[in-house]
Amino acid sequence: MPALESSVYCNWGAGGPSPRRVVDAAESALEYHEYEAPAAEGVYPAAFDAYDDARTAVADLLGAAPSEIALTQSTTDGINRVAGAFDWTEGDVVVRTDLEHSAGILPWQRLEREFGVDVRVLETESGRLDLEAVKAAADDARLFCVSSLTWTHGTRFPIADIVDVAHDAGAQVLVDAVQSPGQVPVDVGEWGADFVAGAGHKWLLAPFGAGFLYVRDGLEADLVPAAIGYRSVADANASDYQYAAGARRFEVGTTSPAPHAGLSEAIGVLEAVGIETIQRRIERLTDRLKDGVPDERLLSPRGYESGLVTIADDEPTATVERLADRGIVVRSLPFPDAIRASIHAFNSSEDVDTLLEAL
């Protein structure tokens, strides 16, 4: 990973630098698509092959079927595709937490403004969610939007429990999972969620533009996406179109095969190492980091939950800039007043010690 040769990189939760072989795979896919495919099978079949490979790779990673995977550009893109597929009416209820990323806030604010949807916000404490509050908010709710890992604290939400509560109330659940794949094992079947949105450009080490959306089998039949194109339908030339079966109805039209070819390669890299092996190493490294942070400054759990470690700081922007001057990459948070270090398996003990010394 060339980016690691010139920095102590501790910002994987924002963007994960790609290994050379991932960028090579994306470049090779683009070169083949533009140089060879036009005179061979054709540019569209070549792109479709890359799409199919990516759906299969993502499905294997998430414990899903390829038919349950739609390819998107980002997590935000995936969430918006779900939000746009419901027939919203005034008074419909969407529930989110107060720790969602803007990707899980802005689409519902728009529905609130445009359609009079009632957005209920579940309050958290130190990155924790009270299931009794979830039950109270579930009354008459139509959709829950929750993160699998909080981007502000690195805490894990009890997704399977939230899904059970929501389903008992008749609501569906959309999970923003972008912080999970690549650092912890993910099984969407165990979660039981209806939709799971994610992207490859963080812990999965893939390029920008390689997003994905899981749609539970059969659920798509009652949804009408806001956008339609030849990838959305069974036969683009039919006089009366029919949506494609499965999650593919959430895809639209022509996109470059390169980002998702990079995602396929990146997933292969991580699976060759082993997601469980990666998780164990992240745990060891984050334990080392937390051991050097006083209790009053550590805003993430003392025990391991993820590679995201949030540290209170009175001047987070200045601290990030000071660390950057020393070649250490972390980020500030808009709330709370803190910096966030995110540690991947590709960091080292020396990286952690360098960060602690600089702090």
Image: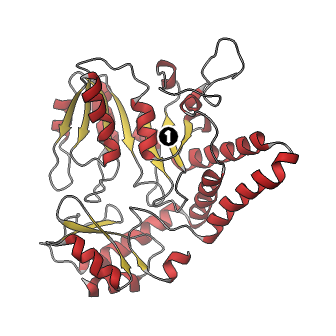
Q: Give the residue at the far top of this rendering.
A: 240
Q: Is residue 323 above or below residue 64?
A: below
Q: Is residue 99 left or right of residue 273?
A: left
The image quadrant of residue 335 is bottom left
Q: Give the residue at the far right of this rendering.
A: 39
Q: Residue at x 44, y 63 (%)?
A: 15
Q: Is residue 164 above or below residue 26?
A: above
Q: Is residue 315 above or below residue 40?
A: below
Task: Specify the color scheme.
Answer: secondary structure
Residue 191 or residue 28, whichever sits in front: 28
Residue 251 or residue 245, whichever sits in front: 251
Q: x, y percentage for residue 44?
A: 75, 40
Quadrant, the C terminus:
bottom left
Q: Residue at x 55, y 59 (%)?
A: 207
Q: Is residue 32 above or below residue 289?
A: above
Residue 132 or residue 127, whichever sits in front: 127
Q: x, y percentage for residue 321?
A: 29, 77
Q: Is residue 88 left or right of residue 219?
A: left
- Is residue 290 among the parts visible in the rendering? no
User: What is the secondary structure assignment of the residue under circle 1?
Assistant: strand
Name the residue that disc number 1 marks: 213
Quadrant, the N terminus:
bottom right
Q: Is residue 61 left or right of residue 139?
A: right
